[in-house]
Image: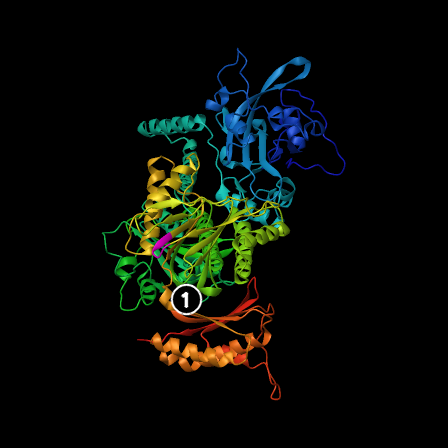
Amino acid sequence: MDNGTDRGTERDTPPSRGAGTGAATEPAAAGRVPLAVVVVDRDGLVSHWSRGAGRLFGVPKDDAIGRSAVDLLPVSGALPEDEDISPYGPYGAYDGLGPDLETSLDGRLSYPAAGRARLTVPEHEGDHARVDVLWWAYPLVGPGHERLLVLAADTAGLRQDEPDGSEGDLAFERIAPGFALHTDFPGAEELARRLPEILPSMSVDESARIVAQVLELGYPVLEFSQNDRVPVTPDWGVPRRIERKARRERAARAAAEGLPVPHELADDAEDLEYAAVREHLEFLNEVSGKIGTSLDLATTIVEVSKAVVPRFTDVAGTYLREQVVAGEGFPDGVPDTTTMWHRVALEHTDEPGRWDDVVPVGEAMPFPAHTPFFQCMTSGEPVLVPRISEEMGHAIASQFEKRDIRPLITNRSMLIVPLKARNVVLGFMILLRHPERVEFNDMDRVTGAELAARAGLVLDNARMYTYQESVAETLQDSMLPHIPPRMAGCDIATRYLPGTLLGRVGGDWFDSVKLPGARTALVVGDVMGHGLNSAAMMGQLRTAVQTMAALDLPPAQLLRNLDDLAQRLGDTYLATCLYAVYDPIASELHIANAGHIPPVLVRAEDGRSELLDLPTGAPIGVGGVPFEAVRVRVEPGDRIVMCTDGLVEVRGEDIGVGLATLSESAAHPAASMDDACDSIIRALAVTFSKAGRGGRKDDVALLMARLNGIEPDDVAEWRLALDPIEVGRARAVVREQLHDWGLAKLVPNAELLVSELVTNAVRHSHSRPVELRLVRGDTLLCEVDDDDHDLPTLRSAGPEEEFGRGLRVVSALAREWGTSRTKAGKTVWFELTLPRR
C-alpha cells in the first residue's frame, strides 16, 4: 500500500505511463489499494504529495509541494467530444474529480465529501487515456496548519471477475481510504502505525483506534478532533443500485420458473448490510443537523431528546451530572455511587402523562454499582440489554421509592449510551424500545455511541458557555458597585444591561461616592470596546475615580488625573466619563465631562427636561486636553439622568434620535425611581425597533438621581476661635441644637466626639477659625474644618502617652467617620445613627 510517505532520501520520479495508468495499473496486493495522498494547508497550497499522487496525477513531488492544489488536482474540465457517457452515474459525465472536491479545496465545504469520476491522463506520444478514480476529501479541524486531506485511488486494480465471465463491479463494500474492510486485513497494523505520518496531529493510539473502528463498522472513519469521530460513506452513484435491481429481478424470474436461485442472491445480504449502514449514517447526519442550534443548555437537552424519538427509539431519558446542570466544573475521575444524576429530559411515544408521575423531570438520584447505568457511566461505553427481564426490571425498579416502574420497562429493549466530552462522562441517555419493535443490535449500539459522542460535545459546549456566562456575570457584578438607594439629600436608581450579542462583560460602569459636606459624587463611564480587557480597564478606572473622589478633588482636576493615569496604563484603550458632584445644601451640581454624552436634567417644577450643555472635553486616555467644569443650580425634586451611549445609539441611526427619546421619556412621571429607569429603557427599545434598527447590541449603564436637597432648618453652623475655651462652647451649642431637633438621646455621645475633634482642630490650626457644622438627614453628620493640611491617623497609645486616644474614641462611638483634605486645610467628620421614633 502506498500510504503517502517516502522512505529515506528516495525522490518522486515522473510516472512512465503505459496502458493509461502506468504504475497504478500494477496488480494490487490482496487487501491493498494503491493510494494517492495529498494534504492541503490553510492557504490552499499542497503541503504533502505522496508518490501515489505523483503516479496518478502525473506530477512529481518536488513540482507539487508549495503549489496551489486547485492547479494540480483535476477538479473540473469538459469531456472530449467523442467520449461516451460513462456507466458510472453522474460523476462519470464529469472529467475531473468533481465539484464537491473543488468546493472542499476553496474551503466552502466543511464536511467530508467523496465520489467517483473518470480522469483524462496523458500517455506516450501525446495520447490520452481514461482512468476510473475513487476520491475522498476530509476537512481537517484542530491544531496544525493543514486544512484538507485528499485521498484518491485508481480503481483498475479493484475489479473482480464474476463467475459468468462478466466484468465484476468494483469492490466498493470492501474499500476504505487505502485499505480493505475485512477483519483479516493484513495491512491494518501497518496502516495504524503510518496514519500519524499521513494525518497531521494524529497519535499512534488514536490512529489504531480509528483503524479498529473502520474494520468493525465497514466504512471509512476520520477524526476531526480528538473527541469527535465522524463516519463517512460516499454515495457510489447509480450503477450499484441498477445492478442490485437487475439481480433481484433475475432471482425472482428463476424462482417463478422453478429454477435454482442464482448465487448472486448472496450479494443481497451484503446489499442489506450496506443499506443498514447507509440508513444509520443518514440518521446520524439528520440528528447532527437537529442538535446544537443553541448554546442554551436547556434548549440543547430538549433537542438531543427529541432527535432520537421516535425514529431510533420510543423512550429517551437524559441524565446529567448536577454540576453540568448548574453550569459548574467538577472533579476529574470517574463517577461513583455517590454521584447525583439529574433527570433533565424525558421524551416518549407512550400516551401522555404515563411517565410523568413515575419518573418526573428534575429528579436527582444516585445509581448503585450493580446497575447497567453505573456500568455505562464508569466505563464510558454503551451498554446493550436486548430485553429487560422480570428480574432486571425488579432490580431497576428498586431504585425508585414508592413507585413501580416495572410496567414501563419490563420486556423492552434497552440501550444506555454515555454522553462524553474530552473523555469525561457528563451524563447518559437511557433508550427504550417497545416490546413489539425490533431489539437494539450491535449496529444500533455503534450508532448510539456515535450519537452520544456528538450530543456530548454539543452539551459540553452548552455547559461551558453557561459556565463562562455565569463567570462573566459574576465578574461584571463584582466590578459594579452596589449603590444604596439613599444618599445624603438624594435618592438613586441604577440599571446595567449587558450587550445582547457581545457578551456579558463590558467596560460600562456607574458609581456614587460619599463626599464631605453631605455631598455625593455621581459617575458614569464607558471604556471603548468589549470583553475582559475592557472590563479590566473599567475596574482600574473606577477604582481610581473612587480614590480621587475620596480626596475631594474638583471634577475637572479629577478627570485630568484620570487621563494621566489612563496614559500610564497604556494607549490601547480610551474611555468617556461624566463626573458630577451634588451639594444638597448649596443646591447645585458641579459637573465635568470627558467625551461623554450629556446628562438629562428633569425639572420638578414644570416637568421640563433638558440636555445639559456642557464642555464636551476629550475622552480619557487622549492626553494633553484640558477639562472644564460648570455649576448648575438645581431645586429639590429635580432629577438627573446619566447613561452610556449604548442606551441612545444604534448603528445606522442618528444619535440625536436616541437623545431626544431619552429626554422625552425621562420627563414622564413614574411611581418610583426604578419604574422611571425601566420606562426609559423601554422607550428607547421601542424607538429603535420602529426604525427597523433591531435590538440593542451594546452595554448600557444608567444612573438616575432625584435631588431632594437638605432644608436650611436641618443645617447648623458655627465659627470657633483658636482658643481652648471654645471646646466648651462647642459642646454647649451642639447640646442645645440637638435638643431643638428632638435628638436628646444623641447628646452624650455627640458632646464627647465634638469635644475630641474641636480640641484637635484648635490645637493644630494656624490662623483661620475652626468651623463646626451639624447636618440632620438620614443620620446626624458632624464636620469640623480647620486650616491644617495634615490628616489625623488612628494609632495605638501607650499607658503613659498623653495623646493618641481621641480618634480611637471617635472610631468606637461613631457610626462612620473619616477625614479629607480641602483647599484650605482638612475636614474631619463623623456620623451618628438617629434614634428610632
**Classed neighbour count for the residue bearing mark 1: other residues with Cα under 10 Å, few (<14), some (14–19), many (≥20):** few
The foreground one among 551 and 654 is: 551
Q: Residue at x 61, y 28 (%)?
A: 69
Which part of the image, by quadrant, shows the N terminus?
Answer: top right
Percent across and percent down for residue 33 are 59, 34
Percent across and percent down for residue 128 are 62, 16
Left or right for 695, reference 53: left
Q: Secondary structure at mark 1?
A: loop
Which part of the image, by quadrant, shows the C terminus?
Answer: bottom left
- Furthest residue to the right? 9
Residue type at mark 1 is His
821 shown above or below 745? above
To which quarter of the image does residue 419 belong? bottom left
Left or right for 475, reference 415: right
Left or right for 195, reference 108: right
Residue 506 highlighted magenta (yes or no): no
The structure's colour scheme is rainbow
Percent across and percent down for residue 267 are 43, 34
Secondary structure, magenta segment, majority class = loop
Magenta stretch, residue numbers: 635-639
- Furthest residue to the bottom? 800
- Residue bearing mark 1: 370
The foreground one among 365 and 311 is: 365
The foreground one among 433 and 21 is: 433
